[in-house]
Image: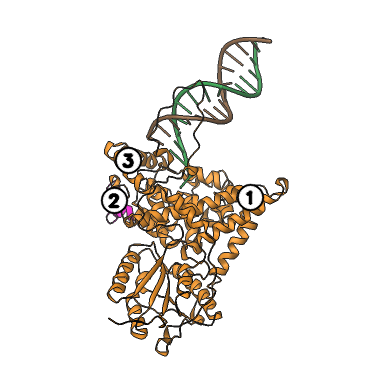
Chain colours: A orange, B brown, C green
Amino acid sequence: MAVVSAQTPVLQVVWFKRDLRWLDHAPLVNAAASGPVLMLWIDEPQMWAQADASQRHRDFALGCVASLAAWVAEQGSHLCTPCGDAIDVLADLKAVFGSFVMHSFEETGNAWSYERDLVVASWCRANRIIWHESPCNGVVRRLSSRDRWSQHWANRMSHAPLGVPLALLWAAIPKNLSHWVCNRQTQPQTATGATEAHALLDSFLMVRGQNYRAEMSSPLTAADSCSRLSPHLAWGTISVRECVHAVWVRRTALLKQPAEQRPAGFLESIKSFESRLHWHCHFIQKLESEPEIEWRNVHRGFDGIRNEGDPCETEAQLLAAWCAGQTGYPFVDACMRSLNATGWINFRMRAMLMSFASYQLWLHWRQSGLHLARQFIDYEPGIHWSQCQMQSGVTGINTVRIYNPIKQGIDQDPHGSFVRQWVPELAYLTNETIHTPWLCEVLPPNYPMPVVDLKLATQAAKDAIYTQKAKPKVKADAQAVYEKHGSRNPSRDRPAKAIRPKTRAAPQTGSAQMSLLF
DNA sequence: AGTGCAGTTGACTTT
DNA sequence: TAAAGTCAACTGCAC
């Protein structure tokens, strides 16, 4: 066995994955403290070939990589961005450097990335390479119980975000690896990366977020009033902890102002934003604890209620209409077309789109979920698949929420301006008819009739889902899902209601624990 | 002035 | 992050 002298500087490889930043980056700090650092991002063709990946993701990620590369260049080194399988790249590194220590964040990703990390871990073991993985945001690896999860999260957030390493010694990149060096000329010139993330956070907390709470629900206002940090959190150009600490700083500043000078609603909006940062990790934790969430119902008692195989002809047509924004329901179509064009739509509309596909169209969430995954620039596997399952009613622990697209349209887009923008063939209709064009005397040309009857389809979906939910075995098994994944955070629960006088005794609905779910 | 009543509101339950 | 239905309290108004 070779004896490595204490003086031998061992190469420290920082493997960047979905953490394309230099601030609050534990692997970078740890690497810098241990030896000469080589910065690595691997362009993995297999990753981009997965069913949930899209060019849109790649464009965003490459922009962030370019921004990271620019920072590394300013620091006097180079970001290595080889293309290929991680194993092959690591083998090349070993061939050139002999040995190294690798640092990265724990990744909670799709099945492909999970498998890849298992292969990398086993390669590291076989090749005597030490791989240090740092916890990512509030997600806990090998979590034994959900009971104390909120405390875990609070503890993670309580420490100040890490700065740039005080001393950074760069490893020399040998000539035979010079083709790995990121050539920024070939990267897209999108303005993105950590700098943009911090600019968004700042403008949100100082200005745009004042009416976040009130304006996040409508697609007319959400685009400006929401933080728009989601793709940055997904690609790690900013950490959740950086956001949380910025929220605390802003809240302190607001509280210092005399109440009458304080911008109305800002504190409430910031509180709402902070709770969503908590949710962010809460949902990713589900995928971390149960990777099968990506393709299998969390509650197996809902297996088979929808077609899990290849879509039949009717289903394929419904799915295609939904994906293309051609369902005949103007608000659904406007939201989908807007999403397809921009890569983003607000949360409530995402829920409505998913609800429509899952209930009125009765499509399995995996099919519709893949379309959304590819469209969302901010696709975050843990959040996405948890949400898909929730909005399809197959978790067993969440309230069934079936959205009415006509009501949502009237509530969130009362003057039809969002519909007019994205469904121009309906632009000439009046406010009164724009959400129900099939009721017009003369049908709008070039716009489809509803692909399903809303009333009938909604009723059929309710019957099916509630029948399933009411089965004793399904009810009983929901408890196990709750134990594994349910939120124990009481602050997310509705406060206990005061007992109203003169009413009959309120019947107990569900267990005390179940009422803690959101 | 007090009563009857249709319509509204809000809290709560069911699906 | 739902929607629809139920029930009781409340409101405005006519007698």
Q: Mark 3 sits on what residue?
A: A464
Q: Nearer the viewer, residue A347 or A314?
A: A347
Q: Nearer the viewer, residue A210 or A411?
A: A210
Crowd around label 1: few <14 · some 14–19 · many ≥20 (10 Å): many
A510 vs A210: above or below: above
Chain on which label 3 sits: A
Q: Mark 1 sits on what residue?
A: A266
Q: Mark 2 sits on what residue?
A: A307
- Identify the magenta region: A303-316
Q: x%, y% of residue C12?
A: 65, 23
Location of residue A116 (image quadrant): bottom left
Q: x%, y% of residue A55?
A: 43, 69
**Label 2 near label 1: C-beta < 8 Å?**
no
User: Magenta segment: does it hold A261?
Assistant: no
Location of residue A284 (image quadrant): bottom left
- Label 3 to label 2, Cα distance in Å? 13 Å
A299 vs A134: above or below: above
SS for dot 2: loop
Disc count in the image?
Answer: 3
Location of residue A483 (image quadrant): top left
